[in-house]
Image (cartoon, coloured by chain):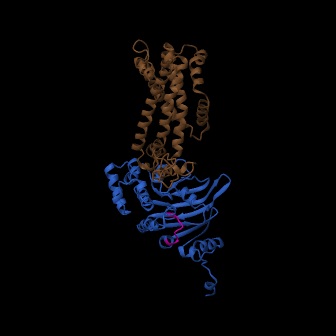
Chain colours: A brown, B blue
């Protein structure tokens, strides 16, 4: 425990890396990479997912190919491709930072495309028909009826994807980006006796950000999901779904195996 | 007002509409009945081209359905449609459900659209529920809002696709009452329904469909009480749960 507290002298390095003596790094870099990757891939991913729904093969097939190839490839492969192989193919030189951003964006776009596609097809078909039958154009129906509903459906998937993308930014340490993982490794190598403290600090750093993200998202869900409050109860527990023996109350009133009581 | 000329439609290999010829004049109330899978809903949905036909032609208010130059949104703006499952927009309140299309399609100001919506909500007896979301409304209330939503576009024709089939029995009447008053005002209506009572009271003509074909067209008594076709007789006796042509009646 004392050793963990000892890591406080390194806290600056965990948070911002070598900055201001070098490029920004540490946990801030993880956040920066996530934000950049999301911003670059959001529009692209949404377009991909939307086009993937087209019946026209010359639109649908390229989108499908992109999504299926990227989703079936480990992120680390994409990073290697962008950093080592692409510059070799096209010539020139890639910086580690731009390679990291580009590969994370490529990766994120494919997943976001699937989220967008699933969100749109989850809106019942009758909604489109109702909008069209009142004389609205397809564009208007999409804008006012389908997308607002699809967006609400997508929120939970987006959030869990953003959280996992944030964790995936740790992978780019492999090409030498000094983000939180790499920062931790550097510190642990400086003082191998306190290695476990360094690794614990990294974990705490990731946990704090992820936990905050999911917590904020839960509040967002509650706020925009007005029309379906019932389904959004992330804290609900449902013992009746558990494949466990039912809780028994003994004669003395001592409850056995009380894990969590179903809220009625 | 609506004219089907030898209209045909296939779903893959299945011939779902077989050579439909039907003319519906202005102000007429037509009830379409028949067993499930007979093509009643499909027939209704071809009128506003939610389902395109493969052969033949439908002329609605002078517009040719299968002509690619026909402005579909203009056509659909003139035709109101009410669905079995209401299809209200769940993320919008009752009044916003109603004002959306008049504002976006007809270009009405917010104030005028809301005035019109309130009048319609009053007409269907729901002016006190204007700010309720669809989940907060009962089935009957939702369907009445849906009717008001279609009427807000001031359509010339109203299509009803089994409007009471998804409702609890005690909520059916409130919807039928709204439809009856609409018919009295002279609205051209095409209604797919199993509500024989409504059909007898309101319909000018009843169309009996079976297996994609129009078997019989006639006044409600003609179809319900004295059907000519064997298949119609069979269907009617099962709908009324008791054989209409019992032996005692035939002896009389």
Farthest residue, direction right: B13
Of the pair A97 and A160, the residue shown nearer to us: A160
Of the pair A174 and A261, the residue shown nearer to us: A261
Q: Quadrant of residue A1?
A: top left
On the picture, is B215 further left or further right than A214? right
Where does the magenta region start and end? B190-197
On the picture, is A252 further left or further right than A77? left
In percent of width and height, residue B112 lies at 32, 52
Q: Quadrant of the C terminus of chain B?
A: bottom right
In the rendered view, tell whether residue B50 sits above or below residue A97.
below
> Can residue A188 be seen in the rendering of this structure?
no
In percent of width and height, residue A154 lies at 49, 40
> Can residue B179 be seen in the rendering of this structure?
yes
In percent of width and height, residue A61 lies at 61, 35
Farthest residue, direction top: A21
Farthest residue, direction bottom: B252
Of the pair A1 and B242, the residue shown nearer to us: A1
Q: Quadrant of residue B40?
A: bottom right
């Amino acid at each position: 425990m004392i050793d963990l507290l000892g890591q406080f002298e390194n806290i600056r390095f965990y948070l911002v890396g070598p900055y201001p003596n070098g490029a920004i790094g540490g946990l801030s870099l993880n956040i920066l990479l996530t934000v950049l990757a999301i911003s670059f891939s959001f529009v692209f991913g949404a377009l991909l997912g939307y086009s993937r729904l087209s019946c026209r093969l010359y639109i649908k097939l390229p989108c499908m190919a992109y999504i299926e190839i990227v989703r079936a490839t480990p992120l680390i492969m994409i990073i290697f491709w962008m950093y080592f192989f692409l510059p070799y193919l096209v010539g020139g030189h890639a910086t580690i930072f731009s390679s990291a951003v580009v590969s994370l964006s490529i990766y994120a776009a494919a997943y976001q495309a699937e989220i967008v596609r699933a969100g749109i097809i989850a809106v019942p078909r009758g909604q489109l028909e109702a909008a069209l039958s009142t004389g609205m154009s397809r564009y208007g129906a999409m804008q006012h009826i389908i997308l607002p509903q699809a967006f609400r459906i997508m929120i939970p998937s987006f959030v869990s994807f953003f959280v996992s993308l944030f964790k995936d930014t740790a992978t780019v340490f492999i090409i030498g980006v000094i983000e939180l993982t790499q920062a931790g490794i550097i510190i642990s190598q400086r003082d191998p006796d306190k290695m476990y403290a360094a690794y614990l600090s990294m974990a705490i750093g990731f946990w704090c950000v992820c936990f905050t993200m999911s917590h904020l998202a839960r509040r967002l869900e509650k706020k925009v999901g007005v029309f379906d409050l019932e389904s959004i109860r992330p804290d609900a527990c449902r013992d009746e779904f558990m494949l466990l023996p039912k809780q028994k109350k003994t004669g003395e009133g001592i409850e056995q195996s009380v894990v969590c009581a179903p809220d009625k | 007002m609506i004219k089907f000329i030898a209209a045909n439609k296939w779903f893959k290999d299945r011939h779902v509409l077989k050579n439909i010829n039907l003319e519906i004049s202005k102000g007429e109330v037509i009830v379409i009945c028949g067993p499930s899978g007979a093509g009643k809903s499909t027939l209704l949905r071809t009128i506003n081209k939610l389902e395109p036909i493969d052969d033949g032609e439908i002329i609605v208010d002078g517009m040719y359905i299968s002509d690619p130059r026909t402005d579909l949104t203009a056509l659909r703006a003139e035709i109101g449609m009410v669905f079995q499952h209401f299809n209200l927009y769940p993320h919008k309140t009752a009044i916003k459900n109603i004002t959306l299309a008049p504002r976006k399609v007809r270009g009405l100001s917010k104030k005028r659209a809301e005035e019109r919506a309130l009048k319609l909500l009053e007409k269907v007896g729901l002016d006190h529920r204007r700010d309720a979301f669809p989940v907060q409304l009962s089935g009957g209330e939702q369907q009445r809002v849906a009717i008001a939503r279609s009427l807000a576009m001031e359509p010339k024709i109203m299509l009803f696709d089994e409007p009471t089939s998804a409702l609890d029995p005690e909520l059916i009447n409130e919807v039928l009452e709204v439809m009856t008053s609409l018919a009295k005002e002279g609205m051209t209506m095409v209604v797919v329904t199993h509500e024989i009572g409504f059909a007898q009271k309101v319909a000018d003509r009843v169309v009996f469909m079976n297996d994609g074909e129009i078997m019989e067209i006639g006044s409600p008594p003609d179809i319900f009480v004295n059907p000519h076709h064997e298949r119609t007789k069979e269907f009617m006796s099962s709908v009324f749960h008791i054989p209409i042509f019992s032996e005692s009646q035939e002896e009389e």
